[in-house]
Image (cartoon, grey):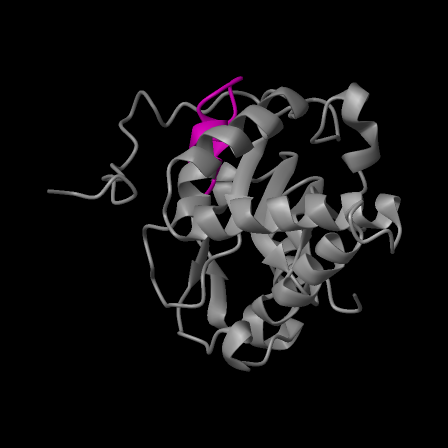
Amino acid sequence: MVAWWQQTFLPLSSEESQLPGPNPASRVFLPEWEQYNQPPKIVTLGHYYPKTKVAAAKSLVKEASPQYGTGSGADARAVRGHLAWTRLLDALNSERKWPLKRLYERLNPMLEPGIAIAVVPPHRAYQAFWPLRILAQTLAAEGGRVDATGCLVRRATIRRIIYGGPSTRALHQQTIQVEDSALVQGRSVLLLDDIAKSGASLVACRELLTGAGAGTVQALALGRVIIGE
């Protein structure tokens, strides 16, 4: 039995290869979400606690509860929200279905029609199936958008950052290549990553897509790693 995330990706038929026209606007997000249209920057939907920070964050929330009478309630609410977002992203990467639905419902109403959607490839070379790609493909199926999730391909496995692996722009550009560049040429592109720490992979992929002829490329990390709390 094929797992839900191991869906078959079929090549485009001649009819499907007639792609819709590019989005005439240079933006990726709709006007009511204009704060996310910042192509020189990486925008994010929330904060993410690495495993080493989760226990301390939970302790802060507990100490700020009414029975303790200490700490800032506002700070505790923010930390509680960060913890909830951390759980959602952990569940996404554990291949649970409910985060896909929640993230789709959050992102789909924010995006312009006609844009292309690409994803930063995972650390393993030539990996075809991972949850973020499924989310991106689901978003691309709406509004005349273009599935460009196969444009960025990792051709050499790298060590994962959470296990101490390096993450530099040069490393990512050396190990990722652009394929099917016609999918992004002249288009506004949403470039998705799940969790960003340094942002090096998003910056590297943005430069690769721009070099392949993409128009506006807006990098979006679902979560930004919290380091200093």
Q: Residue at x 74, y 30 (%)?
A: 27
- Can you tell which quarter of the image residue 164 is in? bottom right
Residue 165 point in image, percent of width and height: 54, 81
Q: Where is 113 relative to 136, above or below?
A: above
Quick check: 94 left or right of 67? left
Answer whether residue 151 is visible to the viewer in this image.
no
Q: Where is 161 relative to 10, above or below?
A: below
Q: Residue at x 44, y 24 (%)?
A: 141
Which quadrant of the rendered structure holds the N terminus?
A: top left
Nearer the observer, 224 or 87: 87
Q: Residue at x 29, y 25 (%)?
A: 14
Question: What is the count of numbered marks?
Answer: 0
Residue 77 point in image, percent of width and height: 78, 43
Specify the segment rendered in magenta: 136-149
141 falls in the magenta region: yes
Quick check: 8 left or right of 129? left
Q: Residue at x 44, y 52 (%)?
A: 93
Q: Where is 216 relative to 166, above or below?
A: above
Residue 148 point in image, percent of width and height: 47, 40
Nearer the observer, 142 or 23: 142
Q: Name, please, the residue furthest toward the left.
A: 1
- Can you tell which quarter of the image residue 97 is in? top left
